[in-house]
Image (spheres, rainbow, N blue to C red):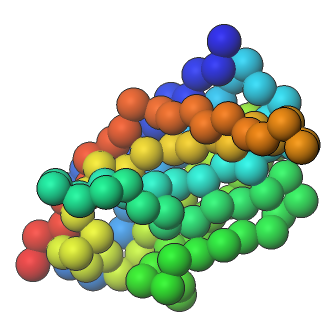
Amino acid sequence: QVQLVESGGGSVQAGGSLRLSCAASGISFRFTTMGWYLQAPGKQRELVVSITGGGTTNYADSVKGRFTISRDDVKNTVYLQMNNLKPEDTAVYYCNAKISYGTFGSSDYWGQGTQVTVSS
């Protein structure tokens, strides 16, 4: 059974920092692409950043230079360091595990979400 447990959300003022964590279980973590998505009220969920098992990252333009994703394949945990936060970063942040089955496609698993609120 796949489980993704997030922690680290909260409220900060603009310019502040937060670090999100996502502990995974039930997957072959080091071979799995992990990601962080956000969903603002009334909007669709969108990719913030992903990291493959080999360490290749893909950042949304809006967070480049401010957010950093990392992974610990011993602890089966992925992190999102968020610096210089802006009010527009306010959203629920979701951890994602994308498990590939090669030519048979892939499956997405999600954490429960953690709220990040940035005040001006």
Q: Residue furthest left?
A: 120
Q: Give left or right: position of 120 versus 68.
A: left
Residue drawn at (72%, 60%) of the image: 51
Residue drawn at (79%, 57%) of the image: 52
Question: Where in the figure is residue 9, as x and y percent of width and height?
Answer: 33, 48
Q: Give left or right: position of 19 versus 70.
A: left
User: Quick check: 24 above or below 95?
Assistant: above
Residue drawn at (72%, 70%) of the image: 57
Quadrant in the rendering for residue 4: top right
Question: Where in the figure is residue 37, as x and y percent of width and height?
Answer: 46, 55
The reply to whether residue 61 is visible in this rendering is yes
User: Quick check: 106 above or below 87?
Assistant: above
Residue drawn at (16%, 56%) of the image: 42
Q: Give left or right: position of 17 versus 102.
A: left
> Can you say which quadrant of the picture contains the C terminus?
bottom left
Quadrant in the rendering for residue 82: bottom left
The reply to whether residue 74 is visible in this rendering is no
> Can you say which quadrant of the picture contains the N terminus?
top right
Of residues 13 and 113, the one drawn nearer to the viewer in this rendering: 113
Quadrant in the rendering for residue 114: top left
